Amino acid sequence: MDLMRKLPRSFYDRDTVTVARELLGARLVHVAGGVERVGRIVEVEAYLGEQDLAAHSSKGRTPRTAILFGPPGFAYVYLIYGIYCCMNIVTEREGSACAVLLRALEPVRNVEGRSSGPGLLCRAMGIDRRQNGRDLLSDDFFVAESSERETMQVVSRPRIGVDYSGIWAGKLLRFYIAGNSFVSKP
DNA sequence: TCATTGATGGTCT
DNA sequence: GACCATCAATGAG
């Protein structure tokens, strides 16, 4: 059985791009209803705080975005288009309002349906707004180091769905594992 | 194969 | 009332 070594708070309390890249290959674990779901993270996006016009935190602190302004290692889960949820992990020191969006997983255990794309990922992992604000150092909700040391190539691309954000739309803040078939389509 | 659109609801102005 | 860090279905070519 895989060794599930939980990533510590200090992992998230670092530069957001570094955290984003190092999350690739790690495993998201969510235990709910007696079912342990595990997925390997293969695609992420970095959101760089209030200065980043593509980030929700660029509008300032609101009831919805409060969790982004809190300490690292917590989940920011929000409803999008009335149908789907998207999950982020807060990074850097409290108040920096940075986060990493999880965009795609490769199913490892008990992941049903598709998990390529942030909305589908949450659905497949049983994640919804009830997880907003939850600590990712919980026993039933955490990220574990990849069990084997793997050599992978990381591709950098512009983020998806943020065309409105001017110069920030073109920045290479989307990262995925080269050649992985579970990376989202567009 | 590509472009367009509908579903659906919370959040902010 | 407008806007969404989405996805699937539709229809034209």
Image (tube, coloured by chain):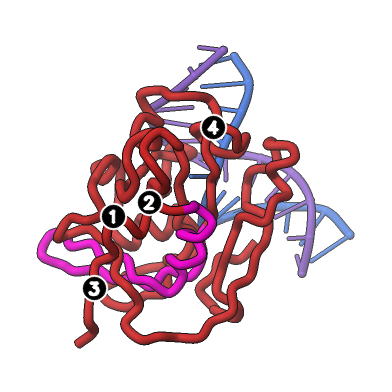
Chain colours: A red, B purple, C blue
Q: Earlier in the sequence, mark 4 or mark 1?
A: 1
Q: Is residue A43 above or below residue A93?
A: below
Instruction: Find disc 4 in the rendering and name its residue.
Output: A50
Do callouts 2 and 4 point to residues on the same chain? yes
Q: Residue at x 61, y 66 (%)?
A: A185
Q: Which mark is residue A5?
A: 3
Q: CA distance from mark 2 to mark 3?
A: 17 Å
- For the residues carrying marks 3 and 1, which lies nearer the camera in this image? 1
Q: Earlier in the sequence, mark 2 or mark 3?
A: 3
Left or right for A173, reference A12: right
Q: Dot 4: what SS?
A: loop
Q: Which mark is residue A130?
A: none
Instruction: Find disc 2 in the rendering and name its residue.
Output: A13
Q: Which mark is residue A9?
A: 1
Write the start and end of the magenta stretch as one range. Answer: A15-44
Q: Residue at x 54, y 70 (%)?
A: A183
Q: CA distance from mark 1 to mark 2?
A: 6 Å
Q: How far from the left and from the top, in percent, is residue A68?
A: 39, 37
Do callouts 4 and 1 point to residues on the same chain? yes
- The amino acid on which the numbered mark 3 sits, given as a three-letter code, is Arg
Q: Residue at x 35, y 56 (%)?
A: A123
- The amino acid on which the numbered mark 2 sits, given as a three-letter code, is Asp
Q: CA distance from mark 2 to mark 4?
A: 17 Å
Q: Is residue A60 above or below residue A18?
A: above
- The amino acid on which the numbered mark 4 sits, given as a three-letter code, is Glu
Q: CA distance from mark 4 to mark 3?
A: 32 Å
